[in-house]
Image: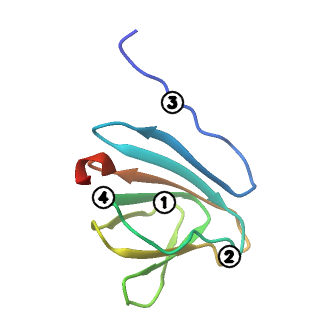
């Protein structure tokens, strides 16, 4: 078999799962119910957030937080301070694609 298959969970409870991380790319899947957030952190690669359900609230560096709805793809540069949360009633579900893999920056 030439291809590789990766799975992700389908849930409505808080979830942070690493789907893939190799020398080329990192892919994470996240689900955040209303009021949940990720710890403040700095991007460890060039980050692309793909919102597939709900609305994401992003505070980057010192700028005011912005809201992005389902269907948005947000690009965040390397080494940017990130505050990610769900401020809405709907479940927030999104994928985080890191390219190149954070391994490239170590």
Between the C-alphas of marks 2 and 3, the distance is: 29 Å
Q: CA distance from mark 4 to mark 2?
A: 27 Å
Query: Do we see residue 79 in this rendering?
Result: yes
Is residue 4 positioned above or below 57 on the image?
above
C-alpha separation, residue under disc 2 versus residue under disc 1: 16 Å
Percent coordinates x, y for residue 17 in the rendering: 58, 47
CA distance separating discs 3 and 4 = 21 Å
Circles 4 and 2: CB distance less than 8 Å? Answer: no
Q: Position of residue 41 (x, y in %)?
A: 45, 71
Label disc, if present, on residue 45 of the rendered structure: 4
Indicate whether 36 appears above or below 10: below
- Mark 4 or mark 2: name the one nearer the start of the chain: 4
Residue marked by disc 3? 6
Q: Quadrant of residue 10?
A: top right
Q: Which mark is residue 71?
A: 1
- Point out which mark residue 88 bears: 2
27 or 104: which is nearer to us?
Answer: 104
Classed neighbour count for the residue bearing mark 3: other residues with Cα under 10 Å, few (<14), some (14–19), many (≥20): few
Q: Residues within 10 Å of mark 2 (few under 14, many from 20)?
A: some
Identify the element where label 3 is drawn.
loop
Which SS class for mark 4?
loop
């Amino acid at each position: 078999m030439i291809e590789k298959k990766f799975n992700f969970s389908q849930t409505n409870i808080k979830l942070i799962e690493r789907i893939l991380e190799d020398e080329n790319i990192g892919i994470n899947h996240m689900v955040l119910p209303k009021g949940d957030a990720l710890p403040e952190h700095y991007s460890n690669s060039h980050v692309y957030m793909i919102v597939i359900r709900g609305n994401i609230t992003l505070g980057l560096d010192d700028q005011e937080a912005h809201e992005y709805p389902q269907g948005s793809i947000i690009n965040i540069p390397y080494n940017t301070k990130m505050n990610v949360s769900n401020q809405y009633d709907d479940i927030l579900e999104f994928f985080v694609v890191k390219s190149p893999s954070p391994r490239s920056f170590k």
